[in-house]
Amino acid sequence: MIAEEILKLQSEDYRNDEFLTKSELAERLKISESYLEHNGSNLPRVRIGNTYRYPINKVINFLNT
C-alpha cells in the first residue's frame, strides 16, 4: 500500500511496469549480477525498503536510447 502511494508521487509513470529484483533483471537481460552491481546505478531504479527494484520497461527504454 505504501509502495503504491510512493509510485503515485513519482514524476514518471511506473504504474504499468513490472519491478524486478537485481537477480531477476540480470537473468532477463542475460548479464551477470556482478556486472549489474557495478553498473546498475546508471539504470532507472526505485528504492523500496533497503533494496532497489528495476522497472523493466524503463530499463529497456533507457538501454535503447
Image (tube, grey):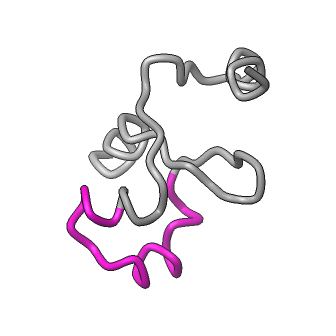
Task: Give the quadrant of residue 57.
Answer: top left
Q: Relative to residue 54, is residue 33 depicted above or below?
A: below
* Residue 52 percent across, percent down from the top left: 63, 55
Q: Where does the image place residue 14, in percent across and percent down from the top left? A: 53, 24
Q: Report the residue that reaches farthest toward the front.
A: 1
Residue pictured at 77% horizontal, 50% vertical? 49
Q: Quadrant of the C terminus?
A: top left
Q: Is residue 27 magenta?
A: yes
**Residue bounds of the magenta highlight:** 26-43
Position of residue 24 measured from the top left corner of the image (x, y, whole percent): 36, 57
Q: Quadrant of the N terminus?
A: top right
State the image coordinates of residue 10 (x, y, percent, origin top left): 71, 24
Farthest residue to the left: give it: 30
Which residue appears at 50% of the width and 56% of the height? Answer: 43
Residue at 50% in and 48% down:
54
**SS majority, magenta:** helix
Q: Is residue 61 left or right of residue 41?
A: left
Q: Is residue 23 left or right of residue 47?
A: left
Task: Reply above or below: 47 against 15.
Answer: below
User: Is 40 covered by the magenta stretch?
Assistant: yes
Question: Residue at 44% across / 73% down in the picture?
Answer: 36
Is 54 rendered above or below residue 8?
below
| Front-most of residues 20 and 64 | 20
Count of numbered marks: 0
